[in-house]
Image (cartoon, rainbow, N blue to C red):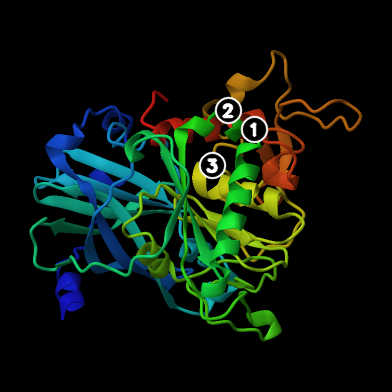
């Protein structure tokens, strides 16, 4: 009954005035303590549809005890992601909070399967808990024009009896590193997947090893003092992970598995509600799911989660690559490996990711990082030292999309290029409430 009543409140909107985040809105000054409490309003919602279109419907709203996000940068300065959540005052005229993100469903919409099937996937986003009634709007970016268009708008009263306030199951939390309050640091959480109750010490050891790998990698090594890191010990009934393409299925805490969209190395979980349930009482800006397996694989979606296996030889760089997606919104720069996506980028527009360009609006990307007289596009010189430029190939396409350097962590696990490094540091400063 609760879900049914919430669905009745969801109102689809076509108001163009709220479709695209504006520079003026981003400059607005919003005082956190005036408008919000230091808790989270978690919004669980379903995305459903197919290659022809999608819809959204709220499933539940939850009051959760922790808000770890920034209290100064309340209006998203980046404009990244395929989806956007915006919180307005009850008049609908003042923007109080906004944030972009990606989902696995968005990727599924670009697969061949989505041309013949309609599906519904669970998703979730958290915003700071409002002191007064607000309007929450969820928008999706259209590949036809690269603009955000509203999927739903709902008025939310913070005292509503339909907001779930039930405490969830707590999980063991090990603090691996703590450098300050949640709103002044990046709060990274490692989640255990495929680790049984008897393997929790191994999980903490693995999480610590991954943390050290991250902070030994530039530019993360420059800002370690701005991070808090915790390991949350979700317990699985069986060890390992599922691999449906090989007929292997495991009962695990978060439902992860290989063969996402039929790609053997693409390791994800569609059960995002289980992820949010696991971190409901833990300060959390970024999530990495550490999977107790040794076969190569992983995945990452911006402001959603990243995951990878704990015991493969390439584990440290796979982790860092996937975390580049989920934490900083970095795009894949490779263009020769097989993927399930079709027409993932519209070459008539500039992609939102900071490390690829179609040259439609290259001035908004890394043009300021180029040495004088660098040709655009930049021809490859195989015998020359690595240099920043504008090299063709990236975003799964050999032609029409360009990358900052020939080799980078986001292409082939080389060190992060200057454009990617800058994007990472900007995101660190955003979460740590420092000047961008």
- Name above or below for residue 261 compared with residue 394: below
- Find numbered disc 3 in the image and state the secondary structure of the residue it sits on: loop
Instruction: Answer left or right for 129 relative to 45.
Output: left
The residue identified by callout 3 is 353
Q: Pointer 3 and pointer 1: residues touching (CB < 8 Å)?
A: no
Can residue 294 be seen at all in this image of the molecule?
Answer: yes
Q: CA distance from mark 3 to mark 1?
A: 20 Å
Residue at the outermost bottom position: 247
Can residue 344 be seen at all in this image of the molecule?
Answer: no
Tag in front: 2 or 3 = 2
- Find numbered disc 1 in the image and state the secondary structure of the residue it sits on: loop
Instruction: Answer left or right for 95 relative to 122.
Output: left
The residue identified by callout 2 is 222
Tag in front: 3 or 1 = 1
- Find numbered disc 2 in the image and state the secondary structure of the residue it sits on: helix
The residue at the point 9 percent across, 67 percent down is 161
Disc ID at residue 218: 1
- Name above or below for residue 228 compared with residue 314: above
Q: Residues within 10 Å of mark 3 (few under 14, many from 20)?
A: many
Q: Pointer 2 and pointer 3: residues touching (CB < 8 Å)?
A: no
Q: Quadrant of residue 168?
A: bottom left
- Name above or below for residue 98 compared with residue 372: below
Q: Pointer 1 and pointer 2: residues touching (CB < 8 Å)?
A: yes
Q: Quadrant of residue 385?
A: top right
Q: Residues within 10 Å of mark 2 (few under 14, many from 20)?
A: few
Instruction: Answer left or right for 156 relative to 221.
Output: left
The residue at the point 70 percent across, 48 percent down is 317
160 vs 366, nearest the viewer: 160
Residue 271 position within the rendered picture, expressed as x and y whole percent measured from the top left:
44, 71
Q: Quadrant of the N terminus?
A: bottom left
């Amino acid at each position: 009954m609760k879900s049914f009543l919430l669905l009745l409140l969801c109102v689809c909107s076509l108001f163009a005035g709220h479709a695209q985040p504006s520079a003026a809105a981003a400059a607005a000054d919003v005082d956190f303590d005036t408008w919000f409490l230091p808790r989270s309003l978690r919004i669980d919602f379903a995305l459903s549809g197919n290659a022809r279109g999608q819809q959204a419907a709220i499933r539940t709203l939850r009051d959760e005890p922790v808000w770890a996000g920034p209290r100064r940068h309340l209006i998203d300065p980046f404009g990244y992601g395929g989806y956007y959540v915006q919180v307005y005052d009850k008049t609908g005229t003042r923007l109080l909070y906004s944030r972009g993100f990606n989902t696995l469903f968005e990727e599924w919409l670009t697969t061949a399967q989505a041309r013949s099937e309609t599906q519904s996937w669970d998703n979730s986003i958290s915003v700071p808990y409002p002191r007064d009634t607000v309007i929450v709007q969820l928008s999706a970016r259209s590949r036809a024009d690269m603009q955000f268009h509203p999927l739903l708008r709902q008025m939310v009263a913070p005292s509503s009896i339909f907001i779930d306030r039930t405490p969830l199951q707590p999980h063991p939390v090990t603090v691996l590193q703590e450098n300050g309050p949640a709103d002044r640091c990046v709060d990274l959480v490692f989640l255990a997947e495929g680790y049984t109750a008897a393997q929790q010490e191994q999980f903490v050891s693995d999480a610590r090893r991954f943390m050290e790998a991250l902070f030994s990698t530039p530019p993360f090594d420059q800002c370690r003092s701005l991070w808090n890191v915790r390991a949350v010990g979700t317990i699985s009934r069986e060890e390992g992970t599922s691999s449906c393409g090989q007929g292997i299925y495991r009962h695990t805490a978060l439902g992860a598995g290989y063969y996402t969209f039929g790609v053997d190395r693409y390791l994800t979980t569609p059960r995002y509600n289980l992820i949010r349930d696991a971190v409901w009482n833990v300060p959390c800006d970024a999530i990495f799911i550490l999977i107790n397996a040794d076969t190569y694989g992983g995945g990452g979606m911006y402001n959603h989660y990243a995951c990878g296996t704990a015991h493969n030889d390439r584990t440290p760089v796979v982790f860092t690559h996937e975390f580049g997606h989920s934490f900083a919104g970095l795009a894949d720069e490779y263009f020769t490996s097989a993927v399930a996506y079709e027409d993932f980028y519209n070459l008539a527009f500039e992609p939102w990711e900071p490390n690829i360009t179609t040259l439609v609006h290259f001035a908004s990307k890394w043009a300021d990082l180029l040495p004088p007289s660098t040709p655009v596009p930049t021809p490859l010189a195989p015998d020359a030292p690595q240099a920043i430029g504008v090299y063709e190939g990236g975003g799964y396409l050999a032609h029409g999309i360009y990358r900052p350097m020939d080799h980078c962590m986001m292409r082939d696990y080389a060190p992060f290029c200057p454009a990617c490094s800058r994007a990472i540091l900007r995101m660190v400063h955003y979460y740590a409430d420092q000047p961008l």
